[in-house]
DNA sequence: CAAACTCAAAAGTACTACTTATTCAAGATG
DNA sequence: CATCTTGAATAAGTAGTACTTTTGAGTTTG
């Protein structure tokens, strides 16, 4: 309880740049600053160290590392960045990542998905089309997330699978910020169906191509809307 | 010191499956088992929790999580997997990741690299060609790693940049296991030069295409040699 | 038989004492 | 005068004890 509070406060401060890289914190100061015990302060520092946000040196203190050294794939760090002032930049970074991974994931899903997964993917594709026609954006988002989640899982690559949360974040971020047209484009729907069909038939190249078309479309949309947003995530 | 030892022992045991998911560890047992103090045991558990390898519940203990929940991008976990019995599978997983990311990274490098980076990339491309002609595999590997590292950095996407270590691991793993022809293929060399040229001229599409050709070639090579290696990293 | 109640077990938190490594500076040595 | 050695101060690392809180499981009771 205590632990989480202090961790969130300190982590967010580092993630959004309030504590610039190179800053040294003495663990005694941390105890004082947050009114926490030594135990809590130490374990918080351990966690931050694990995330590579800080490094500890004897006789010196806890040093805030350069952003380039951080473990940017840690869910907590992603959260802190998305909740901070650099949210647009963070979303841009995550979107680039997603656009790189998903075509490849579609490829492997076509090669490795279980029969059951292939079926579910097709079903999700249909539901996507239905909710789009009904202009039910909220339900659409849900099925969209489920679709991409399933695809990443079916790729049987744990490093791809872990990015489900990232994709979900990007998709919700897009609808949440009105970056999404009121009605999803028919083109995108068709492409999702195409991906599902390709995966169902085990056609790797076709699945990859269709998914690439999806992410390129999304990329261009976002680029057009936030053309100035630089991708430095801090 | 103590901390690292215990962490490595426990982490490796979880990473290579000696401790199956669902196993509950009581922190008192850990102290006994490793002859460590309460402090050390607790902080090790905190670190493992941060990596999402375990979760702690009061009145229950420390529970080993499912591999799907782990943070697979943590350098330490990657290390444990590469040093364990599942090394081939881990390398396959990492290679897939790399093949997904690098073409996209090349694209953004072409759009965002500094003039200095563009120059250095070209220089590295030439050195690559020279060491290849000289059949100096060790030097070749060094320049290859530097080339890909620079490219990922120049993409200005921190999540791409973080994968430098992964790419280095994949490239060394390939030469180290004799999966590399004694003389690097002229085709690959030409493609590296092509990437460098495209980045120098800011041609995103061309850079992406050339890099895609590189990773596809590498993928097919590996697939041909270890055609049976399943990609489950645990 | 189900719901509430009690108890105990194990993690979480707090605090104190001691150990070890490292920096910085003073002093010795060439 | 510069460089190397030595040592003291400092802050993190490790150890151990005591207390708190949560929660799972068994037991009682309506």
Image: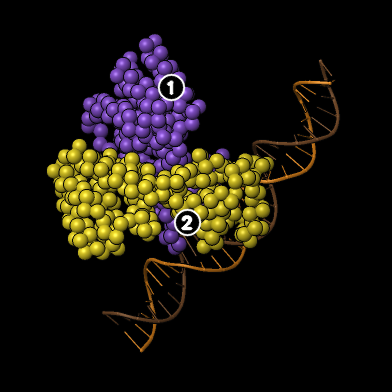
Chain colours: A yellow, B purple, C brown, D orange
| Mark 2 or 1, closer to the camera | 1
Residue furthest top in the image:
B134
Residue A83's disc number: 2
User: Which residue is located at x 34 percent, y 19 percent?
Assistant: B189
- The quadrant of the picture occupied by the N terminus of chain B is top right
Q: Could one spot residue A228 in this view of the protein? A: yes
User: Tag 2's secondary structure?
Assistant: loop
- The quadrant of the picture occupied by the C terminus of chain B is top left
For residue B121, side relative to residue B89 (left or right): right
Of B218 and A177, the residue lying toward us: A177
User: Tag 1's secondary structure?
Assistant: helix
Residue B143: give x, y in percent of width and height.
Answer: 43, 21
User: Which residue is located at x 21 percent, y 64 percent?
Assistant: A134
Q: Residue B137's quadrant in the figure?
A: top left
For residue B103, side relative to residue A116 (left or right): right
Of B172 and A223, the residue lying toward us: A223
Look at the picture and state if A45 lies above or below A34.
above
Q: Could one spot residue B70 in this view of the protein? A: no
Residue A195: give x, y in percent of width and height.
Answer: 20, 46
Residue B122's disc number: 1
User: Which residue is located at x 20 percent, y 61 percent?
Assistant: A133
- Determine crowd level at label 2: few under 14, some 14-19, many 20+ residues with C-alpha closer than 10 A: some
Look at the picture and state if B190 lies above or below A223.
above
Q: What is the CA distance from the residue labelled 2 to the residue labelled 1?
A: 39 Å
């Amino acid at each position: 309880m205590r632990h989480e509070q202090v961790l969130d406060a300190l982590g967010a401060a580092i993630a959004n740049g309030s504590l610039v890289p190179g800053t040294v914190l003495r663990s005694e100061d941390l105890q004082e600053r947050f009114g926490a015990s030594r135990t809590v302060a130490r374990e918080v520092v351990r966690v931050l160290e694990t995330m590579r946000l800080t490094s500890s040196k004897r006789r010196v203190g806890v040093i805030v590392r350069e952003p380039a050294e951080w473990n940017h794939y840690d869910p907590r760090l992603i959260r802190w960045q998305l909740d901070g002032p650099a949210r647009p930049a963070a979303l841009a970074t995550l979107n680039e990542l997603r656009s790189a991974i998903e075509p490849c994931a579609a490829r492997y899903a076509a090669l490795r998905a279980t029969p059951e997964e292939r079926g579910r993917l097709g079903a999700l594709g249909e539901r996507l089309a239905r909710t789009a026609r009904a202009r039910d954006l909220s339900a659409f988002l849900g099925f969209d997330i489920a679709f991409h989640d399933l695809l990443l899982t079916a790729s049987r690559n744990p490093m791809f699978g872990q990015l489900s949360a990232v994709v979900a974040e990007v998709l919700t971020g897009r609808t949440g910020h009105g970056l999404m047209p009121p009605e999803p484009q028919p083109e995108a729907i068709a492409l999702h169906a195409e991906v599902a069909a390709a995966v169902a038939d085990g056609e790797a190249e076709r699945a990859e191509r269709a998914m690439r078309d999806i992410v390129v479309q999304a990329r261009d949309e976002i680029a057009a809307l936030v053309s100035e947003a630089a991708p430095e995530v801090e």
